[in-house]
C-alpha cells in the first residue's frame, strides 16, 4: 500500500459559491457573515423530494454541525413554506426553505492561558499538535480548560461559524487522542476547510498501538459506522444501509510486547472510526482505549489512548498552496517507533 512513503496529492479546490464576507480584523466575539444578516432561501428540487428537512439541511449547510442545525430549527430560525419547521418534516418538490442564522452572540467562554504547540499560523488558519487529555470544546462536564479556551487566549480572530461554544473548530480529535488539528481564524477559511473535509481533499495519517498482532500486515477496511443501538456512548459497525460510510487503510509498522504499531490513513472521518475499525474489524482494540478496549487483557501498559494524529496535509483555504504537517510522535510510542526504524 505504500503508506510509509505516502505523497500527499491534493486536488484543486472548487470555487465556493456565495462566499462569506469577513473582516479579518474582527474578533470572534463580533464576527459576522453575510448569512447572518440576510436570509438564505431556496426551493426544493424533485431529486430532494421525500428527504427529512434536517438531513437535507445537513447536506446543504455543510459548515454547520447537526447540533447547530437542530438548535436553529428549535429556535425558529428555519422555516418551511413560511412556517416554523420541524426537523422530521418530509420535503416535497417546490417547498420553500428559509434559513436565518442569527448574529453570533458575545462569547461567554473564558480565555485561558493554556500552552499550545503551534505547528503553523497565519491570519487565516492555525495548525497545532493537540496533547492527549485536552477536550476540544466546552460541553457538559468540561466547562473550561478546553482547546477553545486556549484558542481564545492565543488568537485575536476565530471563525464564528461553529457556534458560540466552538469558535474556529473545523474538525475534532477525541479528548485522549493527540496530534494535528487545523483551526479556522475566519469564516471564509472555515467554509473552505469544511468543504475540503467533506470532499475528502485532505490527507490524514494516524499512528495507533493495538492490543495484539493482526494476522495480516496491511489492508483496507470499508463498511458503515453509526451509533451503537444499545450503548449510545459507543459507535459500531452497522449493516443494512445504516450508519455512514467509513474507510480506513492500514499497515503494520512494528511489534513490541505483543502489541503492534499500526499506521492508518483515514479516507472518511467518522466518530471513533479508527477505534471501532481496530476493535471490530481487526479484533484488536487500541491500547489504553477506555471504551472499546479491555484493560485487564492489555499486553503492554498504557497510561493513555495510544492514538496519534501524526500527519495532516491540505491546500491552504485562501492561497491554495499545498501544506503538510507532522506532529511529533509522543514518547509513549517510542518503543514501537524504535523497532520501526531498525
Image (cartoon, grey):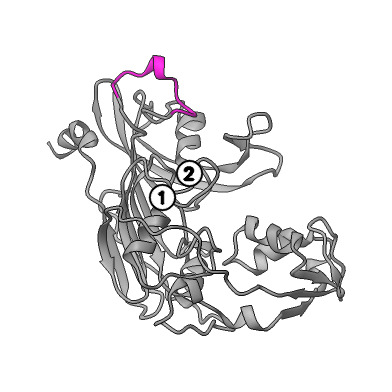
- Residue sitting at 53 percent across and 69 percent down? 106
Q: Main secondary structure of the magenta part?
A: loop
- Residue sitting at 37 percent across and 78 percent down? 320
Label 1 crowding class (10 Å Cα cut-off): few <14, some 14-19, many 20+? Answer: many
Q: Outermost residue, top direction? A: 296
Q: Is residue 293 magenta?
A: yes
- Cβ atoms under marks 2 and 1 closer than 8 Å: yes
Q: Is residue 56 magenta?
A: no
Q: Outermost residue, left direction? A: 342
* Rendered position, 107 above or below 41: above
* Rendered position, 218 above or below 161: above
Instruction: Find residue 23 and report its horizontal and vertical position in percent.
Output: 45, 84
Q: Which quadrant of the rendered structure holds the C terminus?
A: top left
Image quarter of residue 26? bottom left
Instruction: Find residue 307 and report its horizontal and vertical position in percent.
Output: 35, 39
Kindly identify which numbered label has been placed on residue 47: none
Is 78 on the left-hand or right-hand side of 185? right
Image quarter of residue 250? top left
Judging depth in this view, the residue of 115 and 192 nearest the camera is 115
Give the secondary structure at mark 2: loop
Is 19 on the left-hand or right-hand side of 186? right
Instruction: Find residue 262 and report its horizontal and vertical position in percent.
Output: 33, 37
Instruction: Find residue 182 and report its horizontal and vertical position in percent.
Output: 38, 61
Image quarter of residue 17? bottom right
Give the secondary structure at mark 1: loop
Q: Work out how far the residue at label 2 is from the one at label 1, CA to CA, in angstroms.
A: 7 Å
Kindly identify which numbered label has been placed on residue 146: 1
Mark 2 highlights which residue?
Answer: 142
The part of the chain drawn in magenta is: 290-301
Is 205 on the left-hand or right-hand side of 88? left
Amino acid at each position: 500500500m505504500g503508506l510509509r512513503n505516502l505523497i500527499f496529492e491534493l486536488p484543486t479546490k472548487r470555487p465556493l459559491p456565495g462566499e462569506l464576507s469577513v473582516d479579518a480584523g474582527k474578533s470572534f466575539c463580533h464576527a459576522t457573515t453575510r448569512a447572518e444578516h440576510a436570509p438564505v432561501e431556496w426551493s426544493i428540487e424533485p431529486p430532494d423530494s421525500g428527504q427529512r428537512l434536517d438531513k437535507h439541511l445537513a447536506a446543504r449547510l455543510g459548515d454547520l454541525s447537526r447540533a447547530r442545525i437542530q438548535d436553529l430549527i428549535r429556535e425558529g430560525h428555519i422555516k418551511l413554506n413560511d412556517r416554523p419547521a420541524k426537523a422530521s418534516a418530509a420535503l416535497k418538490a417546490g417547498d420553500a426553505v428559509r434559513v436565518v442564522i442569527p448574529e453570533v452572540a458575545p462569547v461567554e467562554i473564558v480565555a485561558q492561558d493554556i500552552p499550545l504547540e503551534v505547528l503553523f499560523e497565519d491570519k487565516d488558519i492555525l495548525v497545532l499538535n493537540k496533547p492527549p487529555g485536552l477536550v476540544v470544546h466546552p460541553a457538559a462536564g468540561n466547562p473550561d480548560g478546553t482547546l477553545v479556551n486556549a484558542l481564545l487566549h492565543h488568537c485575536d480572530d476565530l471563525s464564528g461559524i461553529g457556534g458560540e461554544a466552538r469558535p474556529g473548530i473545523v474538525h475534532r480529535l477525541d479528548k485522549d487522542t493527540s496530534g494535528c488539528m487545523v483551526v479556522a481564524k475566519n469564516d471564509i477559511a472555515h467554509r473552505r476547510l469544511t468543504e475540503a473535509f467533506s470532499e475528502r481533499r485532505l490527507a490524514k495519517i494516524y499512528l495507533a498501538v493495538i492490543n495484539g498482532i493482526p494476522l495480516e500486515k496491511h489492508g483496507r477496511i470499508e463498511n458503515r459506522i453509526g451509533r451503537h443501538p444499545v450503548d449510545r456512548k459507543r459507535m459500531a459497525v452497522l449493516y443494512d444501509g445504516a450508519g455512514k460510510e467509513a474507510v480506513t487503510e492500514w499497515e503494520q509498522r512494528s511489534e513490541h510486547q505483543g502489541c503492534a504499531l499500526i499506521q492508518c490513513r483515514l479516507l472518511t472521518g467518522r466518530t471513533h472510526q479508527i477505534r471501532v475499525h481496530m476493535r471490530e474489524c481487526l479484533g484488536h482494540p487500541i491500547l489504553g482505549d477506555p471504551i472499546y478496549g479491555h484493560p485487564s487483557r492489555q499486553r503492554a501498559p498504557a497510561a493513555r489512548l495510544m492514538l496519534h494524529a501524526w500527519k495532516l496535509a491540505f491546500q491552504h483555504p485562501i492561497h491554495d498552496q499545498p501544506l503538510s504537517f507532522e506532529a511529533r510522535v509522543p514518547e509513549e510510542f517510542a518503543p514501537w517507533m524504535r523497532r520501526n526504524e531498525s
